[in-house]
Amino acid sequence: MASIIILSVSLIYYILVVVADWMMFKKAGEPGFKSLIPIYNLYILCRFSWEGCKFWSIVLWSVLISVGNMFSENLIGAMLVSIGGIMLTIDSLRLNYYIAKSFGHGFGYGIGLFFLPNLFGILIGLGKEKYCGNGYKLAHQA
């Protein structure tokens, strides 16, 4: 009985996250189905909130971590994982800040998106927030 309840709640939560992501993409002027395609959805997210070329930076750090894990028994592998992890964390923080900025929020909301992405994504997707434009450009306006 408990497993059926857990399964039902998990399914409802998953559907809510998918619908919220779909709505967030629609608010940004992108077709909602793009939020369902793995990796491509990250590229589109980078494009409408930061810069499309920054997507490749995130991919580079992820590959660096993977390569480092293959050689994790020696110092070079450990260094690759450490450097890749630090840089991926920095880029993820920046991306989440620019997503928050794209929807009219500030740094605190970006931190929320970093630590609780599904919850804050639901708030953006199903909330009354409007897309304000590219968050990177908004943050760097003089």
Image: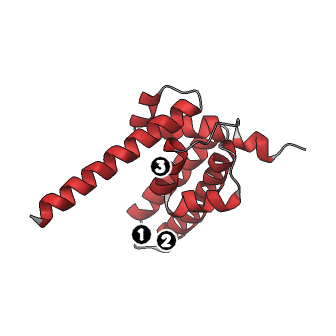
Sequence-wise, the earlier of marks 2 and 1 is 1
Q: Which residue is mark 2?
A: 78
Mark 1 or mark 3, which has the lower sequence index?
Answer: 1
Examine the image and state in which quarter residue 39 appears.
top left
Q: Nearer the viewer, residue 138 or 71?
A: 138
Amino acid beneath label 3 = Ile
- Write the residue at 62% across / 50% down: 95
At 63% across and 57% down in the image, what residue appears?
Answer: 110
Q: Amino acid at mark 1?
A: Ser
Give the residue drawn at x 47%, y 49%.
122
Give the Cα separation between the discs numbered 1 and 3: 37 Å
- The residue carrying mark 3 is 122
Q: CA distance from mark 2 to mark 3?
A: 36 Å
Residue type highlighted by circle 2? Ala
**Does any portion of residue 90 appear in the rendered image?**
no
Q: Residue furthest front?
A: 128
For label 1, the SS is: loop
